[in-house]
Structures are given as structure tokens and as C-alpha cells.
Amino acid sequence: MTAKKTFYRQGDIVLVKEDRVPATSIKKDNIIARGEHSGHAHQFTATAPVSVFIDPATSTQHVHVEHPAVLEHDTHENHELAPGDYEVRVERELDLVGEVRRVAD
């Protein structure tokens, strides 16, 4: 039997529960992504008990949540994340000429 994965979706961003943040990851600001058209950001408040990291080898972002924290966005529903570690995934789409690209927010 496969265990269910915990995840949170906010627009084109998905945070998937993982065992731990990779040791090679580097801490960065609390912004996960900015909308390419709107400029709105998927982010945690500066005072949130959260650390956002990026793995330089893969450019994958990871989030470590110490205590429940809110992922905010101006045009999407806010989500309260449970404590733990998460991998950030960005939704992709196939465009009309067959190129894979990030979904525009």
C-alpha cells in the first residue's frame, strides 16, 4: 500500500511533503515565485517560522516549516502549512509548438 503524499497547491505552485531539505541547499528569501504577468508573489511573510532554500545543483526550491505558517498570494487562496519539509514544484505546460514551459501566473 502506498502512503498518501501531503501537498499544498497554490495556482501553478505545488509544495510536496518530503523527508528533509537536501544538505546542499542554500537559504534564500521567503519568495517562492513571482507571477510573470501580475508580479504577485507566492511567499511567506518575513516573520513566518519558515526557511526557503534552493539546491544549486538542480535549481529546486525547498521549504522548512518550523511551526504552522501561511503561504500567501494576492490572487490565490492562502494556505496554512503544517510543520515539516517540502519540495517546491512549478506546474509546466506544453505550448502550441511543443515546447515545455512554466505555466504563466
Image (spheres, grey):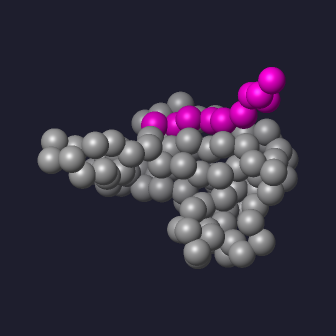
Left or right: where 100 falls relative to 95: right
Between 92 and 79, the one lying in front of the other is 92
Farthest left residue?
97
Residue that sits furthest to the front in the current view: 1
**Front residue (pair 2, 18):** 2
Q: Is residue 38 visible?
A: no
Q: Tell me which residue sits at (58%, 76%) in the image.
A: 56
Left or right: 34 as drawn, with respect to 72: left
Quadrant in which the N terminus is drawn: top right
State which quadrant residue 22 falls in. Answer: bottom right
30 or 53: which is nearer to us?
Answer: 53
The range drawn in magenta is: 1-11
Residue at x 59% of width, y 51% of height: 88
The quarter of the picture where the C terminus appears is top left
Q: Residue 34, percent across and down?
A: 42, 56
Question: Where's residue 20, x and y in %?
Answer: 80, 57
How far from the left and from the top, in percent, is residue 4?
A: 74, 28
Most frequent secondary structure within the magenta stretch: loop
The single residue placed furthest to the top in the displayed view is: 1
The answer to whether residue 103 is visible is yes
**In the figure, residue 47 lies in which quadrant?**
bottom right
Q: Position of residue 101 (x, y in %)?
A: 31, 52
The residue depicted at 72 percent of the width and 33 percent of the height is 5
Vertical position of residue 54 compared to residue 41: above or below: below
Residue 90 within the magenta-colored segment of the rendering: no
Left or right of 9, for residue 76: left
Q: Is 18 drawn above or below residue 78 in the view shown?
A: below
Question: Is residue 3 a member of the stretch shown in magenta?
Answer: yes
What residue do we see at 28% from left, 43% from top?
Answer: 94
